[in-house]
Image (cartoon, rainbow, N blue to C red):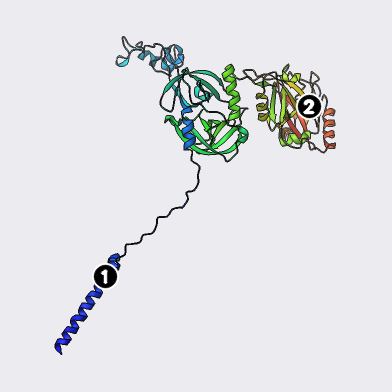
Amino acid sequence: MNSEKKTFRARKSLIATVATLALTGAVGLGAISTGVAPVLADPVKLSQPVEAPSFADVVELVSPAVVSVRVSSVAPEAAAAGSPFPGMPGFEDLPPDHPLRRFFDQFRGEGQQGQGPRGMRPRERGPQKPRPSAQGSGFFISEDGYIVTNNHVVEGGSEYTVVMSDGTELQADLVGTDPRTDLAVLKAQSSKKFTYVDFADESKMRVGDWVVAVGNPFGLGGTVTAGIISARGRDIGASFYDDFIQIDAAVNRGNSGGPTFNLAGEVVGVNTAIFSPSGGNVGIAFAIPAALVKNVVDDLIKDGAVERGWLGVQIADVSKEIAESVGLADAKGALINDVNSGEAAEKGGIKAGDIIISVNGDDVASSRDLARKIGNQKPNADVEVVVWRNGKTETLSVKLGKMPGAEQTARASTKDQAPEATETNFGLSVTPADDGNGLLVTDVKPDSDAESSGILPGDIIRSVNSKPISSAKDMKAAADEARKAGRNRIFVQIVRDNANRFITLPIS
């Protein structure tokens, strides 16, 4: 009996041990206990990759046409004349009692016998060598080596070097510049054939299109950034010809003059400016649109300069008050402040006080828009100009002149004194001008409508609602006529400091 109990206990212990081993194997060894390989989860991924634009093909295609532009210039002669320090005034330029004269005397060896302090002698000034002064970007537009860049990149330069994408350096000649649009053209000094790019059809460019900017930011060498066209027709106050494309992409200093491409490898614009409160990139850049670049570049290659049409007027925007005072439905168009004597506008019948509302059938939105439309025409071109005058439109034919090198200003002659003054309902005292052409303002009442509108004693009122006046009665009659037409203001032309101005006065 005892032996049976011992055998039973031994079997029980063995079974417990096997059970323990089996449990341990199942928990710790898994596959060993079952003889099956472990099953692992698949990595997370999409069965089909998301289709996103790649710019690699565009970049590979256009990169050989994009160059870096290095500009060198000679230091000004004034910096070299007798001065031991470049960039500082010359000794001979200083008056005898100038505090720096003694300082220069020492370095010239004149304050002591022999040499100056520490044996320094005045530096010998040989012929000036060009030194690096600017760096930007550009691109080939022809296989014979014409290159487009910015005027502000090459301005003041005397030597120009272009560096191609493979590192080849070539000297270039300046063909021409156009400061008004900030464009310039260089010509590589080489007989080889270059890879070049063409301009895009501007009518097909849309806000939201992908674009790729290629250039030389910070002198790092060829760099590519991407973004979209975020706006068109931007006016950033650079000139009367502002018509920029806004690019939301990383464009930095050194990208100036470089191209922005569409996904077909065509140039949509030339990078010119960035919006940057800090000086670095914040993602907003401005490019000169392709159509404008092409027109300017063609003129520069052909003639070395750009010839533009010219009206010979002084212009201003049309405010809501002015539009209301003359009966215009919208505050659009360009107000003619003055007309230069003997020039295209005067010959074509345009008068001060006219509002130009269209040119060749295209509506004029503002004074800058008028400047662009006229500037895009050639000298001697005949243009159809529609003006708003005396509450109605008039169509005029004008043969444009040639834009001069400097802006012209028209001057009107006025006299100072007049006899008796008459009060008006606008807070003004006036008297006929000596030449009989308008009314001289002799007094302006404080807190009056006239004072609020900016009229000053000494101003000459030439016309009201585009009609000449010579008495206070004429002014009242013009106000009555405007009131009958349902207007709340009159449109007043004044002359101050020999220049025309236009204001509005409320009808009381």
Which residue has dot 1 on it? Answer: 24
Is residue 325 shown above or below 381? Answer: below
Q: Which residue is mark 2?
A: 395
Q: Nearer the viewer, residue 503 or 136?
A: 136
Question: Which of the two residues, 453 or 39, is positioned nearer the viewer here?
Answer: 39
Please state the horizontal and vertical placement of residue 478, each as a whole percent of the image. Answer: 83, 31
Q: Which percent across, then down, holds residue 456?
A: 72, 28
Q: Is residue 507 above or below residue 151?
A: below
Q: Residues within 10 Å of mark 2 (few under 14, many from 20)?
A: some
Callout 1 amino acid = Thr
Spatial CA span between label 1 and label 2: 103 Å
Which marked residue is nearer to the observer: mark 1 or mark 2?
1
Instruction: Identify the residue shown where x is 79% and y is 18%.
Output: 435
Q: Amino acid at mark 2?
A: Thr
Which residue lies most toward the left here? 3
Q: Is residue 415 visible?
A: no
Instruction: State which quadrant residue 383 falls in.
Output: top right
- Can residue 177 be spotted in the picture? yes
The crowd level at tag 1 (other Cα within 10 Å; few <14, some 14-19, many 20+) is few
Q: Is residue 320 left or right of residue 173?
A: right
Q: Secondary structure at mark 2?
A: strand
Question: Which element type, helix, strand or loop, lies under badge 1?
Answer: helix
Q: Quadrant of the C terminus?
A: top right
Query: Taking 216 as reference, is 460 left or right?
Result: right
- Residue 339, given in percent of the width and then of the height, sits at 72, 21
Q: Which mark is residue 345?
A: none
Question: Residue 229: x and y, percent?
Answer: 56, 38
